[in-house]
Amino acid sequence: MALPAGLSRKLGKLLGPQWVDKDPADLLVYQSDGLTLHAATPDVVVYPETTEQCARIIKTCASYGAPFVARGAGTGLSGGAISDGGVIIQLSRMNRVLQIDHRNRFAIVQPGVVNNYLNLQVRPFGLEFAPDPSSQAACTIGGNVAENAGGPHTLKYGVTSNHILGQTVVFPDGSIEQLGGTFPLAAGPDFSAFLVGTEGTIAITTEVIVRLTPLAPSVKTMLATFPTVAGATESVSAILSAGVLPAALELIDNLCIQAVEAHLKAGFPTEAAAILLIELDGEESEIANESAPVEKACRQNGATDFRVAQGEDERQQLWRGRKHAVGSLGKLSPAFYTNDGVVPRSKLTTILSEIYRIGSKHSLRVANVCHAGDGSMHPLVLFDPTTADGAARAMECSEEILLACLEIGGSITGEHGVGVEKRHMMNRMFSARDLEHMARLRTAFNPHDLLNPGKVLPGGATRGEVKAGVSIPGGSWI
Amino acid sequence: MKHTESETTVDWPATGSAIAPKNRTEAATCVRQASIDEVSIGGPGATFGWDLRRLDAVISFQQPDMVITTETGITLAELKDMVEEKGLWLPLDSGSSSAEPLAELLMHGGGISWLSHRHGMPRDWVTGMTVLDDHGNEVVNGAKVVKNVAGYQLTPLYLGSHYLFGPILEITFRLLPLPKNITAVRLTANSPAPLLDFIDQSRTPAGLAGAGEPWEGLLLSKRGSLWELQGFSRMSEKGLTALLPTEAKYESVDLMDAQAPPREQAPGSAGSRLTLQTLPSQVRDILLSPEVNPYSIYCYPAAGIIHLSWEDEHRTSEPLLQRLSGSAARIISRQTPFNAEQIISSAFPAAIAEKVKQALDPRGVFGPLVVGQ
Ligand SMILES: Cc1cc2nc3c(=O)[nH]c(=O)nc-3n(C[C@H](O)[C@H](O)[C@H](O)COP(=O)(O)OP(=O)(O)OC[C@H]3O[C@@H](n4cnc5c(N)ncnc54)[C@H](O)[C@@H]3O)c2cc1C
């Protein structure tokens, strides 16, 4: 769709011409998010600095009938932050931490604040923003809110929705609303909480009140080595059944271990079929009480080695290995495709063997990192993008894995959201009626489907169709 | 309910009474019939209320999955008993309303408790639900797994909605392992100050390492002139004892090991009652102010919730309200927790409430939208 004549000039008047970018070379950056298999090019990118500017941009776009999409760091993995024509509202200039109230454990931030940056600001107060997506060095709080991001530590500390107290938002008609507040609890219907995870399709967040969580006084990180994947998955259930709630309980399989060790030498045992990275936190006596049952559960399920990180350096090294596991796969394959299915925890063993089976059926290697304690997985399908059907086969394989998750009572996405990527699978998980119920809310607030069109819900939204499978130079994570 | 060959009709009870379907099909039929007969069921101002007590089935509960799905007629206490028996824990408490069906608790915004500063509200534990829409169809939202971001999560709109958008028939909660090795604490004093000092000292991060959140459950109450702190923690008895300010004056100090988390024993709400919400840092000022002296107090200090009650019908809360005006406190309920006039909290401005109502129940089958402060 061509940009309506006069729109970009109007936007330039609003923001100053330097904050309106139409240069085709620059627009390439916005062609995809972290999932480069889906691509679409916007007509223009704008860089607002305030809520009021966002509101004026939106009103202007709406008056021209032009679609608009909010974008944070573009690390999303479901094609949520792309726009086929129209306007991308890039929120990176709205990157200030506005207030930190350590006594009442909240902070007020702009949406473009990077997750790690916020943590750097609040750590001196003994606090943190608990959601810790592996992309936290780059992703923004606005993106975390829109995607309801999680991470390794959400097993104990919950996902983003558990840590948002309020928001300032701009609706697709340009109206500004303040939702929630700084009090720790909200009874009654909570529209701010509803917006978390709506993938920027109902409103654009321009300020966020986040809950801050006290850092644990002590942490103990352990690495258990297993000769079989089933040994690792069974240990997960055994640890939780022993009444222990680790702060994190991550599974990494052999292929990923190989990649990590080739890339950055985290000290993972390359002979292992799988490892569990287990972190306990709390008061020292609490950790002391919990360590023994954890080791016992692992040993009883066949762990051949059980190692405790000695000191902060070794702990950081192990975590570096985990957080870079996905990126490290570039060492094994020029391209890979990741999804994020979820299964009931007791079905981890079943789904992992199913994933390997599906991979071999498609003659593709699949590496796995899992937030095992949550039953949440990242199967990474390795493929060769230079072959004609490489990407298509990877997508097919990945889709089959997600269907297998559904088959055993799971979900098609635990972290990355639906975006454009899994939109066509929503009706495999939900009935038409369930989807219509969600659509009613979308229509109420985004009646002309101008805000982030064509995302999340299948059908209906015709604007913003993206082209799957277009040829894009391989990124480190496709 | 009457069944004829071709249709089922509903014999409506007296206006103002509750519809108590014996199963989900019957609940759905009532909604369908309501729209035909132009009556409404559910929200404040509706022709009838809901009584979902008979919908009390456990739909699924696999201990290793750490989720439970039940119908909403069972009580929170029953649900907690069930999961605790299997070594799991739902960190929600309902204080005085533990005998209510879940539906009532959830729909009326209940579940603020001594656990809330640490574990949040029911919405923090719900992963999925089945509701009845305005056509009497069952609609599924969310999932029965711990983590899921597929589609919009409607739970935060339904919880606390007073049935305005329809009833929740079925709900899935994620669970935690039941904490073992906990320390239960009971301290009494003649003034709140030493108890508040202890709370501050235990919760304020000391240095960069932080102190964690030591309290799983925490409440402060006053009956007559005696103040009492009750709490429980994963910290050891020794660790907690070390945090007790030695110079403070207590009437009694009681720390004991416990094998399972105790449940909150909130007093019933006889007489008048006012619930304030404030920032945790303001609680001390409010509790120490002379204006609150005449009241019985029941407070979740770390969550900034203060319940004041009084039985003397001539007492007015004016001096207290004057004292609070201009401070960061607001009244969130009078008389009963989260009553109808207060349901639309600031998280849900009226214009938005109207849009949501229009989207989910345009014909008002679940009653009119009541917005008021
Ligand atoms: C290597 C890697 C690892 C990752 N690991 C994790 C992980 O562990 N857990 C996890 O959950 N995710 C993970 N992700 C996915 C991604 O990082 C998260 O979804 C993140 O929250 C996206 O933030 P962003 O700022 O990059 O958002 P973007 O990608 O820019 O946008 C994502 C979506 O949010 C919308 N949006 C952005 N800002 C706003 C706003 N202010 N208001 C309204 N809508 C907005 C966009 O329109 C889009 O739909 C990973 C991604 C990568 C590349």
Image (spheres, coloured by chain):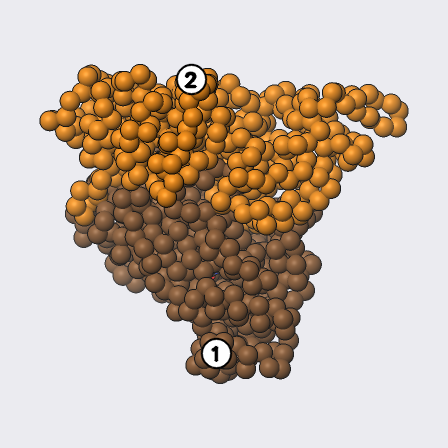
Chain colours: A brown, B orange
CA–CA distance in space, label 1 to label 2: 66 Å
Residue B89 shown left or right of residue A27 in the figure: left
Q: Residue A218 falls in which quadrant of the image?
A: top left
Secondary structure, mark 1, is strand
Q: In front: B224, or B43?
A: B224
Amino acid at the residue labelled 1: Val
The spot of residue B83 in percent (x, y) is: 45, 24
Amino acid at the residue labelled 2: Asp
Task: Please rate how many residues cluster around mark 2, counting C-alpha atoms within 10 Å: few if below 14, some from 14 to 19, many from 20.
Answer: few
Q: In front: A387, or B44?
A: B44
Residue A105 shown left or right of residue A73 in the figure: left
The spot of residue A241 in percent (x, y) is: 38, 29
Q: Which mark is residue A1?
A: none
Secondary structure, mark 2, is loop
Residue A254 makes an appearance in the image: no
User: Could you tell me which residue is drawn at 53 percent across and 53 percent down?
Assistant: A198
Q: Which residue is mark 1?
A: A20
Residue B306 makes an appearance in the image: yes
Residue A107 shown left or right of residue A305 in the figure: right
Q: Residue B144 falls in which quadrant of the image?
A: top right
User: Could you tell me which residue is drawn at 24 percent across and 51 percent down?
Assistant: A123
The spot of residue A12 in percent (x, y) is: 50, 80
Q: Ligand 1 falls in which quarter?
A: bottom left
